[in-house]
Amino acid sequence: MTKALIVIDVQNDFCPGGALAVNEGDQVVGPINEMMNDYPLRILTQDWHPAGHSSFASVHSGKAAFEVTQMPYGPQVLWPDHCVQGSEGAAFHPALNTDRAAMIVRKGYNPAIDSYSAFFENDHKTPTGLEGFLRTKGITSLMLAGLATDFCVAYSALDAAKLGFDVTVDLAACRAIDLDGSLDRALEQMRAAGVTLKG
Ligand code: VGL
Ligand code: ZN
């Protein structure tokens, strides 16, 4: 078994003071830096939207942040503007150890489609390329941590399980947005998909 650590979206905008702050989001940095010692291969993901991205409430007239709208690929939560390419908010948390990463997967750069998962855009079809990277490296087992438990971490874990990887999410190294019960739903979906929930 060859294992890899996938660190999801530990970026300033998801930490306290950021544009889409997750409660205690910065608390994941310490545990994640520690976990890096236990995995020979480490991958970071970075939410990376162009200005005016279609997931931003600001581009949908009459819609407020955290409302849901219909997109061609299904329902989409509308977010405050966040993780705009090159902005300080899109940068990794300054205390995250990024030096040890083998790969950084950027996602959400297609203006028309959001991308929560590290593997596929929200159409569930367009690949990011991460699967190919992991397979060519012989990786079969994944540990996931980061932000946010109920969106990007959960979507990544569910796709990884569907692709046949052995998947664990370390909940002590994750924090959630928790919108209208989204955390409980995500935990239930991950359990049902055979994802191991640790902590
Ligand atoms: C995320 C909402 C919008 C996440 C990213 O990283 O969980 N959530 N973009
Ligand atoms: Zn985003």
Image: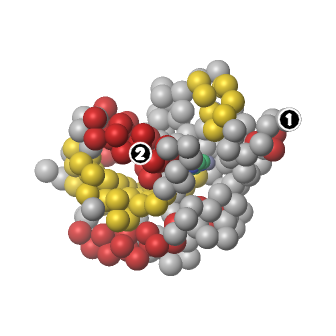
Instruction: Report the label total.
Output: 2
**Which residue corresponds to the image point at 66% horizontal and 34% vertical from the top-left?**
68
Closer to the observer: label 2 or label 1?
A: 2
Q: Quadrant of residue 174?
A: bottom left
In-image side of 43 versus 39 (left or right): right
Label 1 neighbour load within 10 Å: few <14, some 14-19, many 20+: few
Q: Which mark is residue 61?
A: 1
Cα separation, mark 2 vs mark 1, equals 31 Å
The amino acid type, in three-letter code, at marker 2 is: Asp
**Farthest residue, direction left:** 1
Q: Name above or below for residue 18 compared with residue 75.
A: below
The answer to which of marks 2 and 1 sits earlier in the sequence is 1
Q: Name above or below for residue 113 compared with residue 184.
A: above
Q: Is residue 4 visible?
A: no
**Farthest residue, direction right:** 61
Residue 67, given in percent of the width and then of the height, sits at 69, 38
Q: Quadrant of residue 16?
A: bottom right
Residue 35, given in percent of the width and then of the height, sits at 30, 70
The residue that label 2 is drawn on is 184
In-image side of 39 versus 10 (left or right): left
